[in-house]
Amino acid sequence: MSDEENKLTHMPEEFQDALKDLPEDKRKNIYRSFSMVMGGIIPQSNPIVDKLTKEHIADIIKNSENEAERSHIDAKQNRICVLTIAIILIISFTVLVCVFRNHIQDIENLLTHLMTFVMGIAGGYGFAYKKINSEN
């Protein structure tokens, strides 16, 4: 069986009969058009999907469950870390105010510099975040 006849066997009977009577160049054009249309309707077989077994699917499900559990643990640890940092900052600020309670001018200067530093960090972070998101 020639290559062209092999191609024709994938077509419905009516098309095969009609194409046999046409000249070769028109037959090739019609076959190309038909294969493009059928390629969009009939999905192509993926060799990896053909080799999947029940064990592979079970492993994929197990791994996704493990990943979900790990992400939950990471989120919990992240919340604990943020809470710890917030508590440390509050305690540090309280100690600082108690130590320098008689030196209001020094606290004012220190807080001015500290707030400038924090706002600079926040602005830089916001700028970088916007720049990264605008590229995507």
Image (tube, rainbow, N blue to C red):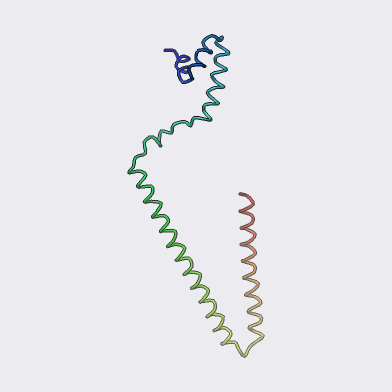
Quadrant of the snapshot with the N terminus: top left
Q: Quadrant of residue 105?
A: bottom right
Please name whichever residue, 25 or 14, is drawn nearer the observer in this view of the structure. 14
Q: Give the x, y percent position of residue 122.
A: 62, 66
Percent position of residue 62, x then y = 36, 51
The answer to whether 30 appears left or right of 62 in the picture is right
Q: Residue at x 41, y 55 (%)?
A: 67
Q: Is residue 68 left or right of residue 53?
A: right
The residue closer to the viewer here, 94 or 80, is 80
Q: Does residue 95 sit above or below 5 in this rendering?
A: below
Tell me which corner region of the image, top left, top right, bottom left or bottom right, holds residue 89.
bottom right
- Classify residue 5 as left or right of residue 101: left
Q: 105 or 88: nearer the eye?
A: 88
Relative to 76, say whether 8 is above or below: above
Q: Name the residue located 54 percent from the left edge and 78 percent from the top edge.
A: 90
Residue 2 in the image: x percent, y percent?
Answer: 44, 13
6 shown above or below 102: above
